Amino acid sequence: MIRPVRRQRICRQLFLRFTACKRQNKLPKPPWVVALISAAVLALSSCMHTFLPDFAALTDGANVTNFTDKKHKSFVIFNGKTFTNAGLVNIYLEGDGRPYINRTKVSADPTPLYPLALDLMQVEQKAAFYITRPCYHQRDENCHPGLWTTGRYSSEVVTTVREAIEWVIAEYGLVDIRLIGYSGGGTLALLLAEELPQVREIVTVAGNLDIDAWTTFHDYEPLNQSINPARRALPESVRYMHLVGEKDTNIPPRLGAKIYSLPEHRLRLFSGFTHSCCWRENWLQILAQIERGYVEE
């Protein structure tokens, strides 16, 4: 019998190989093959989803803390690497995961099948952290679907993530931090800018920077319980860098125009990149450029 941790590692590797082939258009096209592959993807998704709460399988033994605030729980993951005297400490925030199964049916568990921000954190060669949102990877008695649907960027979610980050800051004696948010994690990073005085820089990766423009573009239900960073006065004392995929069809570059025009905000457009490709493959190089203060497009 395959142990759960090993099973998740196998499922994850198969899933990542499949998605890599799909991105590179290497999958065969006959209808019966497509149907077979679709069934396999569903099986892999179920396999991964079943064991997602077991962070030992996703983090290769990194330091995992189950943080609890007054209402919710969050996982805090420390990669165990060495702290350096130079530069900022990076804290990663994940995307929205799976709020809905389809356009109308709400997911019972929004945990992402492929936590890209976690993968980016694991590329780091120095100390870094990853914070989960409330009700992702685990449930508590205060969880409800509003926290991952219309209220996914609400003050309740922001408060839980902020308190988890404040715990990290106090526990590890951090002074200056950089928030790196992928997709909806970029939304949360912007909303946290004014709440954490230790934040010196924010990097969004395929970030959802104007949630009203995004819901209108997709004709989605308005996120009326969420806070739109495009309508907030973001602190000018923080540096902002927005990394955007030229071929991103989920959050097309033009949707963030209002944010890009603000002072201290820099846009970097990556040719050939989509919403999920090809950030991980190039992250080490991008990270080095972020540290230097300039990212080449």
Image: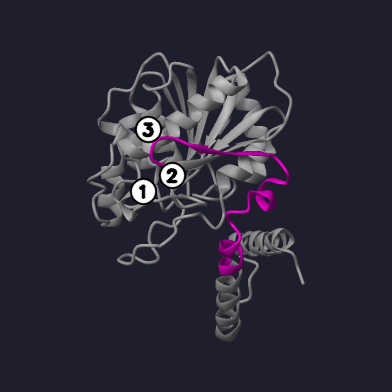
Q: Residue 167: where, in percent of width, then height?
A: 52, 26
Other-residue count near label 1 (Cα within 10 Å), few / some / many at <14 / 14–19 / ≥20: few
Q: Are marks 1 and 2 in contact (CB under 8 Å)?
A: yes
Identify the mark nearer the N-term, 3 or 2.
2
Residue farthest to the right, as pictured: 1
- Residue at 64 percent across and 63 percent down: it is 15
Coordinates of residue 64 in the picture (x, y in percent) = 63, 40
Q: Which residue is mark 2?
A: 134
**Mark 1 belongs to which amino acid?**
Asn
Between 163 and 124, the one lying in front of the other is 163
Q: Residue at x 55, y 75 (%)?
A: 38
Check disc 2 and give the amino acid type: Pro
Q: Which residues are magenta?
A: 45-72
104 vs 173, left or right, is: left
Q: Is residue 64 magenta?
A: yes
Q: How is the image coloured?
A: one colour
> Magenta stretch containing residue 209, yes or no?
no
Residue 208 lies, in percent from the top left, at: 38, 42
- The residue under label 3 is which amino acid type? Thr
Label drawn at residue 142: 1
Eyeballing the image, is 201 above or below 151?
A: above
The residue that disc 3 covers is: 159
